[in-house]
Amino acid sequence: MTAAEPNALSYLARRGVAAQWRGFLRALVETLDANLDAASRDALLRAVGARFATLTPLPACAGLAELEARVNEALAAADWGWAEIALDPNDRALVVTHCAAPLVATGADPSGGWVGAVLEGLYGTWFGAQPGAEPSLVPRRTGSRPGVILLRYGRG
């Protein structure tokens, strides 16, 4: 399956969250939304993603292909979809296409896009722990479509 199959990805993303956690996650994110502004909520969710990454560390990787393989092993273990990681040589950045991330809709966020902040923290910690990583770089969401979240990891 590729990132070009949005209906399948959207289905997998919804299915990837066990029934016993859907209501809890929706209540949690809606509570965060009710008590925090969007920037504060996203900062907290990035911190959660970073903490999750420290609990599931990646080994040092020798190249991009190995990094993508290790990321996908960790994501598969958590049933969090998969990632395609590419280098944009013009922009000197890594481009992450995260497919079938766990999707839990909320009243204010029917697409479940809030998980993008979690992924920013997750990838930032994983990538930042790799040999030669630049500590000041952080991944940022650049877009999304059903079942897919796009992130960029580079300067600027």
Image (cartoon, grey):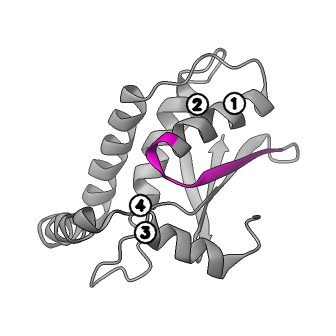
Measure the alpha-carbon separation of dots 2 and 4: 18 Å
Identify which residue is drawn at 25% across, 56% down. Answer: 40
Identify which residue is drawn at 37% across, 47% down. Answer: 46
Q: Nearer the viewer, mark 2 or mark 1?
A: 1
Instruction: Residue lying at the far right in this picture: please name it.
Output: 90
Q: Secondary structure at mark 3?
A: loop
Measure the alpha-carbon separation of dots 2 and 1: 9 Å
Q: Which residue is mark 3?
A: 103
Measure the alpha-carbon separation of dots 4 and 1: 21 Å
Quarter of the image for residue 20 reads bottom left
Residue 127 numbered tag: 2
Identify which residue is drawn at 73% across, 75% down. Answer: 5
Q: Position of residue 79 (x, y in %)?
A: 48, 51
Measure the alpha-carbon separation of dots 3 and 2: 23 Å
> Which residues make up the magenta segment?
77-87
Residue type beneath disc 1: Leu
First-in-chain label (4 vs 1): 1
Q: Position of residue 57 (x, y in %)?
A: 47, 24
Residue 115 numbered tag: 4
Quarter of the image for residue 128 reads top right
Contact? badges 2 and 1 (CB < 8 Å): yes
Measure the alpha-carbon separation of dots 3 and 1: 24 Å
Q: Secondary structure at mark 2?
A: helix
Observer-nearest of 127 and 76: 76
Q: Do we see residue 76 in this rendering?
A: yes
Residue type beneath disc 3: Leu
Quick one: quadrant of the N terminus? bottom right
Q: Nearer the viewer, mark 4 or mark 3?
A: 3
